[in-house]
Amino acid sequence: MGTKTIGLRDEVYAQLKARKRENESFSDLVIRLLEEAAVDWRDSFGTLSEAEADELEALADRSREQMSTGMADRQQEALEALAGDDDETA
């Protein structure tokens, strides 16, 4: 197993040293911190209350409806503009 030398600012070293456990090497500390920081996105499932989930679902539904309505309006305007262009060239 190889080793690497890295440079750390003094304040970073002090923070790491403060988190280091007795009989723990700095390599072990870094591994432990990285494992603690690794977050599985699935761990967050189910963290909303039912009321919060219902509110979020209602917001998403309204957003989809507004997007759909806006898109239909823009399509209609584009069709009307295209139809108007045909009248001018005739």
Image (cartoon, rainbow, N blue to C red):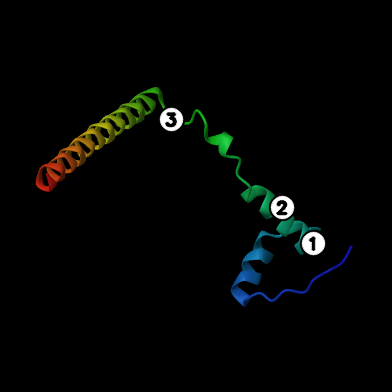
In the picture, which quadrant includes the N terminus? bottom right
Q: Earlier in the sequence, mark 1 or mark 3?
A: 1
Residue depth check, mark 3 versus mark 2: number of the one nearer the observer:
3
Q: Amino acid at mark 2?
A: Arg
From the viewer's side, name the closer residue of 15 and 46: 46
Instruction: Provide residue 2's location: percent of width, then percent of height.
Output: 87, 66
Q: In terms of sequence position, does the residue under pointer 3 or pointer 2 come before the other? A: 2
> Mark 2: which secondary structure?
helix
Q: Position of residue 12 (x, y in %)?
A: 61, 70
Residue tagged by mark 1? 25
Relative to the observer, which residue lies in front, 86 or 13? 86
Which residue is rendered at x = 77% and y = 57% of the image? 28
Q: Residues within 10 Å of mark 1 (few under 14, many from 20)?
A: few
Residue placed under numbered mark 3 in the picture:
48
Occupied quadrant, residue 15: bottom right
Q: Of the residues shown, which amino acid type is indicated by label 1?
A: Ser
Q: Position of residue 60 (x, y in %)?
A: 33, 31
Looking at the image, residue 14 lies above or below residue 59: below
Are the residues flagged by discs 1 and 3 in contact, CB closer than 8 Å?
Answer: no
Q: CA distance from mark 3 to mark 2?
A: 29 Å
Q: Secondary structure at mark 1?
A: loop
To which residue does mark 2 refer?
32
Q: Residue furthest front?
A: 90
**In the image, which is nearer the foreground, mark 1 or mark 2?**
2
Q: Is residue 78 above or below residue 3?
A: above
The residue shown at (10%, 42%) is 87
